[in-house]
Amino acid sequence: YIWNISLVKELITELNKLLPHVPIWLGGPEVSYNAEYYINKYSNVAGVMCGEGELTFRALMDCYVKGNVSDISEIPGIACMKDGNIIVNKWPEPVNMDEIAMPYKVAGLDEEEYRNRIIYYESSRGCPFFCSYCLSSADKKLRFKSLQKVFDDIQFFLDNRVPLVKFVDRTFNCKKEHARAIWKYIGDNDNGHTGFHFEISADILDDEDIDILKSMRPGLVQLEVGVQSVNRDTLNAIHRNMNLDVLKNNVEELIGNGNIHLHLDLIAGLPYEDMKSFKNSFDRIYSMCPHNLQLGFLKLLHGSLMRSEAKQYGIVCRDYAPYEVLYTDCLTYGDVLELKKVENVLDMYYNSRMFVAGLKYLVGFYESAFDMYREFGTYYCNRYPDGSLPSRNNKYSLLYEFASGIMDNDELAVIADLLKYDMLLRDNVKTYPAFMEPSDKMREDARRYIEKGRTKAEHVEIFNLDVPHYIKTGDIIKKKTPVHFDYLTRTIMDNNASVRIMEELQ
């Protein structure tokens, strides 16, 4: 984990008290770019392994095992003290991906342990793009594992029924034949259980890629797309070339097919992005209806180009990891705090997928989705100033209370039904928030639909409008609509109960 340096700094001194004769070595991206600082600062640090660690670490251990400690200073990638001076050796050549042992195969885990793990896996290193905020921009040597080795590793995960494999390749589909072959293998060998996550560039997907992805079992593949901004000046400043129109078309086509989970990212604090510009970026991405919209904040990582260009754009960040932006020459600290509020309610409400119908209706009362989340974020923080989290029922009540400030009684009746539908999609609730409690007559009418032999994992609720039709079309049709919820048969993509509209009883 790249941002654990604060913990490591504590361990350096405390561990040395207990194990004074054990040499302490540091490694990883956090220390690779300022190795001399750590050697000077911590006298009990033997040295730093810079750059990729596999070969350097192996050579270092070999010196200790064989007693050749004097040879350590000759190892590529090593920074250490020698004769009272700090030496920093040239970093090792990029490792051949096929020479790296797959750690999960040698970990000695039993089958049951694999079934409870998320596996992180890389089939390539480096990136063909040079986004200045990303450490991958410092690694310009892109290389891939051989496809046969990747297939063997994937099959190992499939055989052990790992629930989710996250490919950490920076841009998985930068080499089309590599990506397509892996996607085809996953599709052809699907075990019906294991899912795969990829970070991709959506604007370089072509028709063949789209066809392969659209053929996948629902839930088999998740895609994460780092859009970051739609401001052209911002994209140019961070060296990110992207066709936004193609990206939008590809994302909407994949979402429309209904089988791929799409996760889109935005970054606040980038050059030239003020609140007006960020609002435009947010609204453009929100309109694509991703399953998850992550609002992140710029981090000035050691070794990244953006860190060296920070003064140019007036970017000021925290001094401690993960070095998150405080303000820029375009975005004030107050703006950052406002965006933190947006991030909070966006994660809690939109990304939870538990308020889909209610949010769709509520956002329709605003010219901008961003404006709604900004106002709601402030409202939420005023209600929960201590940072505590509301209960499930209170989350629904809070959204309804917020809506009551902008809706009339008829509109509130609509959103009450929509939120009740949202709630029942996830759980066969026994206790409703007060605003959605059905009348005694509605309860009695619903009981008439209870069929003999129905299980406790089923529920019938009567709504005053056709909610499924609204979710599909956006049209409000007010009519008594009995809906059957089956919690034993859930949808794969969002784990919602399966639903069917029942014929109204005479």
Image: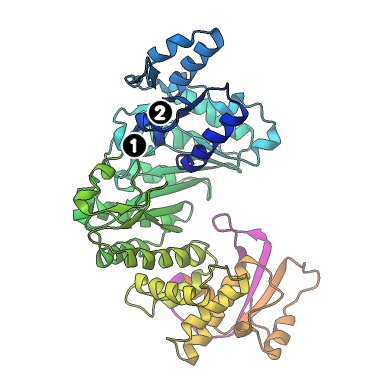
The secondary element bearing badge 1 is classed as helix
Q: State left or right for residue 4 relative to residue 177.
A: right
| Depicted 135 relative to depicted 436: above or below | above
Depth order, front residue of 27/426: 27
| Depicted 302 relative to depicted 335: above or below | above
The secondary element bearing badge 2 is classed as helix
What number is the disc on residue 216? Answer: none
Residue furthest out toward the right: 453
Depth order, front residue of 270/150: 270
**The disc labelled 2 sits on which kind of residue?**
Ile
What number is the disc on residue 39? Answer: 2
Q: State left or right for residue 315 relative to residue 74.
A: left
- Identify the residue shown where x is 56% and y is 27%: 103
Q: State left or right for residue 147 relative to residue 459.
A: left
- Identify the residue shown where x is 58% and y is 32%: 15
Depth order, front residue of 78/234: 78
In x, y percent, where is residue 60? 48, 16
Res 200 visible: yes
Q: Is residue 360 magenta?
A: no
For disc 1, the neighbor class at 10 Å (few under 14, some 14 to 19, many from 20) is many
Of the two numbered discs 2 and 1 in the rendering, the one whose residue sits closer to the viewer: 2
Rounded to the nearest angstrom, the CA distance separating label 2 from label 1 is 25 Å
Q: Is residue 486 magenta?
A: yes
| Depicted 158 relative to depicted 456: above or below | above
Question: Disc 1 marks which residue?
Answer: 136
Count of numbered circles on the image: 2
The colour style of the image is: rainbow
**Which range of residues does the magenta coloring cover?**
472-501
In x, y percent, where is residue 342? 41, 67
For disc 2, the neighbor class at 10 Å (few under 14, some 14 to 19, many from 20) is many
Image quarter where the C terminus lies is bottom right
- In the picture, residue 194 is in which quadrant? top right
